[in-house]
């Protein structure tokens, strides 16, 4: 009897399943609100942990770029700044950005709270997490520029202010529906809102902090490479690959939806353009350095990848593949020329973050109208100037106050011994430069 029932039930259920699937496919091409909610939330979470993995990329890149006597402090700074960003963005940052009135300038000083609703289209917690890892990226940019001569705890204090107050305020001007959004400013995933912001804060700190001891000769030229040689080129390379991987979450997740055919195609196109822009940045930096100095500079190639990625971040959806390559290539060239500009100004940027993030970010944001007809150059210029001037001035004031109170620079003796000895007491490498 049981065998007879099995023979009867199996084909019946097969037919029911077939007709059910056929009716779904024929009747509707979009998912339900709840399924869309799940897909969108999943996109935020998956892309969010890709961006979180960029913290590891920054730690690798910076650890490899500094001299071997300053590696442990870089590790401490990167795990510390990520933790500070998480706490501060929960405590005040999110609502400073997203509690802003329409067309306004600043949100509310309140902790984040969960008010998830199906109508929102995604879980509130997934959005908080996705936005928090962007915030952490901003302060990671500052870390590398000021390496090898800044005190650890004043840096942590600045990280708290940047992630809790400075970054959220200017972020809200656009992504929170503030005054720049009302004027039509466009920055898809943060060429200016994230990368230029970090670069501007780093520039203010580098000016006040000054270069590492002996970094420039009496003639104002960069000192020979050996005393300031990167401790591990392979580690820098791995760091850049990790950042490159994380950037797919950075840009792809900024589509903010994955519940339709259009969104899925858009995310796929963003991945392609993001990848091609990085490729363009690498090869442009390789060609330019070969033509300029007769050698192919691997560090500039690696930073060229970052410059290309930063440049495409403002508009990774609209460009054609060839245009994405060109936008990234210009970003890579800006990295090379920007590095030379900083040398001429005797500004010591240990990892090259200012050219790769600030300068390339400005270029990428101004290039948006080339492919996005909804944007215009005037509004883009207004956004670039407003955000960078605001961040630079506020950061400069904060760095100045700390410099004249708690102090931000290590003593000459401590710098010569190495920050690993004086700041953490943990030596990364037994064999030194």
Image (cartoon, helix red, strand yellow):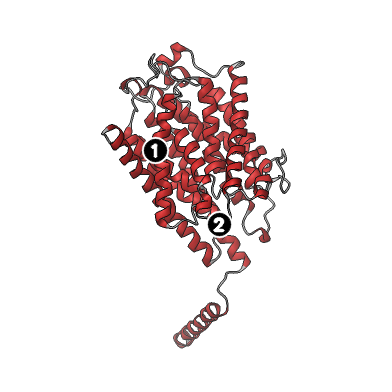
Residue 65 can be seen, yes or no: yes
Q: Earlier in the sequence, mark 2 or mark 1?
A: 1
Helix, strand or loop at label 1? It is helix
- The residue drawn where x is 57% and y is 71% is 30
Q: Give percent across and percent down for residue 236.
A: 36, 35
Report, in whole angstroms, how far the alpha carbon at label 2 lies from the one at label 1: 30 Å
| Residue 214 image-quadrant placement | top left
Q: Give percent across and percent down for residue 260.
A: 55, 66
Mark 2 neighbour density, 10 Å: few (under 14) some (14–19) many (20 or more): few
Return the residue at label 2.
373
With 368 as the anchor, is 304 left or right in this view? Answer: left
Total count of labels: 2
**Direction left: furthest residue:** 294
Quadrant where the C terminus sits is top left
- The residue drawn where x is 45% and y is 46% is 246
| Residue 386 image-quadrant placement | top right
Helix, strand or loop at label 2? It is loop
- The residue drawn where x is 48% and y is 52% is 316
**Mark drawn on residue 303:** 1
| Residue 307 image-quadrant placement | top left
Task: Check the image and report above or below for 6 versus 135.
Answer: below
Q: Give percent across and percent down for residue 321.
A: 41, 56
């Amino acid at each position: 009897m049981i065998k007879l029932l099995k023979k009867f039930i199996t084909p019946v259920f097969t037919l029911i399943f077939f007709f059910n699937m056929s009716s779904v496919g024929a009747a509707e091409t979009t998912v339900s609100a709840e399924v869309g909610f799940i897909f969108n939330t999943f996109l935020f979470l998956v892309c969010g942990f890709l961006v979180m993995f960029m913290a590891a990329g920054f730690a690798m890149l910076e650890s490899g770029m500094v001299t071997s006597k300053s590696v442990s402090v870089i590790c401490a700074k990167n795990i510390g700044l990520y933790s500070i960003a998480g706490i501060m963005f929960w405590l005040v940052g999110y609502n400073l950005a997203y509690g802003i009135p329409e067309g306004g300038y600043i949100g509310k000083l309140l902790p984040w709270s969960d008010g998830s609703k199906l109508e929102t289209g995604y879980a509130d917690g997934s959005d908080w997490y996705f936005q928090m890892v962007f915030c952490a990226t901003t302060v990671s940019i500052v870390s590398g520029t000021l390496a090898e001569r800044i005190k650890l705890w004043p840096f942590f204090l600045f990280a708290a202010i940047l992630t809790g107050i400075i970054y959220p305020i200017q972020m809200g001007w656009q992504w929170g529906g503030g005054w720049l959004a009302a004027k039509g400013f466009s920055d898809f995933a943060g060429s200016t809102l994230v990368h230029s912001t970090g670069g501007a804060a780093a520039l203010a700190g580098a000016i006040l902090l000054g270069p590492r001891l002996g970094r420039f000769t009496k003639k104002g030229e960069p000192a020979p490479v050996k005393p300031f040689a990167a401790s591990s080129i392979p580690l820098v390379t791995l760091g850049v690959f990790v950042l490159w991987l994380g950037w797919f979450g950075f840009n792809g997740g900024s589509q903010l939806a994955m519940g339709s055919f259009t969104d899925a195609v858009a995310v796929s196109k963003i991945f392609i353009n993001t990848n091609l822009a990085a490729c363009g940045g690498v090869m442009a930096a390789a060609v330019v350095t070969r033509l300029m100095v007769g050698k192919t500079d691997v560090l500039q190639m690696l930073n060229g990848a970052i410059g290309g990625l930063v440049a495409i971040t403002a508009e990774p959806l609209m460009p054609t593949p060839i245009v994405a390559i060109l936008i990234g290539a210009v970003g890579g060239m800006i990295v090379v020329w920007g590095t030379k500009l900083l040398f001429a100004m005797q500004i010591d940027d240990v990892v090259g973050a200012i050219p790769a993030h600030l300068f390339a970010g400005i270029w990428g944001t101004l290039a948006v109208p080339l492919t996005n007809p909804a944007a215009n150059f005037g509004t883009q210029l207004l956004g670039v100037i407003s955000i960078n001037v605001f961040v630079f001035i506020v950061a400069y004031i904060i760095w100045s106050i700390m410099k004249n109170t708690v102090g931000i620079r290590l003593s000459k003796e401590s710098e010569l011994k190495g920050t690993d000895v004086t700041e953490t007491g943990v030596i990364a490498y037994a064999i030194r430069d």
